[in-house]
Amino acid sequence: MKILKKLLIGLVGIILLCVVLLYVFDYDYILKGVRVVYMTGHKTAYIDDYTYFDNHVVEKSSTLIPWKLHANYNRVTPTEKLNIINKEMGTVAFMIVKNDEIWYEKYAEGYGKDSKTNSFSMAKSITSALLGKAVMDGYIKSLDQPIGDFLPKFSEGLAAKVTVGDLSSMSSGLNWTEHYTSPFSITARAYYDPELREVMNGLDIVDEPGKEFRYLSGNTQLLGMVVEKATGKSLSEYLSESFWKPMGMEQDALWQVDSEDSGMEKSYCCIASNARDFARFGVLFKNDGKFGGKQILPKEFTKLATQKRFEKDDMYGYGFWLSNHLDKDIFVMRGILGQYVISIPQDDVIIVRLGHHRGGPQGSFSEDFFIYIEEAYKMLENAS
């Protein structure tokens, strides 16, 4: 009994020492990660984790624009392969939109059309949309405006060359390491630290900007800070007035912020919404910036955003991933756990998938991405 007591005391001592060291070396944000992830039975960020963070509300309009249901709505059963991959990957929402009408939708048990889940990096596309809107509204001159005009920290040396377009197209030269497993990484700190602006202002530009694509979540976080400073509004407020209200979203959304006090949105991730409302962004960009008969974004911007910027890096535009699967021109909003809004303009098709997991890597995308497209097309062919 005495030995057990000594072991317990020793264990408590080690834990307390670790906590003290985390505070001493400025890694105390890890404690929040432990509480949010491991103490809830998870191993990493998950689609329902927004309830453990502070959030700003993205308000919907009192006037909704309801989705139209296609004449063939839910008349075709999913293929066996689609059922298998959806079960294996923990899909919670799967939608096919045809001619701007919902052609098919299915939700996992416990989820429905009103269920909010974490967008993860699909928010990068939405933040880039906010950039386009800020240019349209005159808050930002153009995609070539230096970010130093808004963020003084980035107004000297190489940093002075970085433009808002470089942030959106992932070509800033920022010293950010995109690492998702180490709790000591800048990516983990950005997710859990209560002072995100301070974290970002501690970074530097170390490579020549505007030369090549390198996927860094820090780029979009800086872009969010630029939009916030340029507009004088929180990102949630600007998102509400620019898109959520004029596009008649069905629900308020929630955008995670670093803390209640700081109130900086995690612009590189973390908008909690539903499949139907996420899908509207696919419609908006597919239709050259128009939604509900209104020009929400400039046509020129939506075309630019959904085409490659760099010849040798043909998988990314401005906030959107790109694919030529099945010899089709495809642009994609994408999140780390297989969150997708897949837009295929030539066939007037949009595929939305939200869920817990994604498959293994296969080029620029994971293998399940291709399966969702292929099986959706088989369903459409079966209908005809």
Image (cartoon, helix red, strand yellow):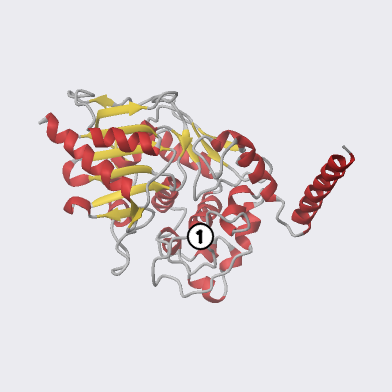
- Residue, disc 1: 178
Most foreground residue, 360 or 286: 360
Task: Determine if residue 380 is in view.
Answer: yes
Give residue 157's quadrant in the image.
bottom right
Quarter holding the N terminus is top right
Residue 223 appears left or right of 342: right
Give residue 199's quadrant in the image.
bottom right
Task: Determine if residue 247 is in view.
Answer: no
Image spot of residue 95 (x, y percent):
30, 33
Image spot of residue 342 (x, y percent):
30, 44
Residue 304 appears left or right of 238: left
Most foreground residue, 32 or 149: 32
Most foreground residue, 232 or 17: 17
Q: Residue furthest right?
A: 2
Quarter holding the C terminus is top left
Residue 2 appears left or right of 79: right
Task: Residue at 72%, 51% (x, y): give it.
Answer: 28
Image spot of residue 176 (x, y percent):
54, 64
Number of numbered discs:
1
Residue 147 versus residue 128 in the image, above or below: below
Most foreground residue, 309 or 59: 309
Image spot of residue 257 (x, y percent):
59, 43
Residue 383 appears left or right of 44: left
Q: Residue furthest left?
A: 384
Give the crowd class for mark 1: few <14, some 14-19, many >=20 residues within 10 Å: some
Per the image, label 1 sits on a secondary structure element best described as loop
Amino acid type at mark 1:
Glu
Residue 96 versus residue 257 in the image, above or below: above
Give residue 273's quadrant in the image.
top left
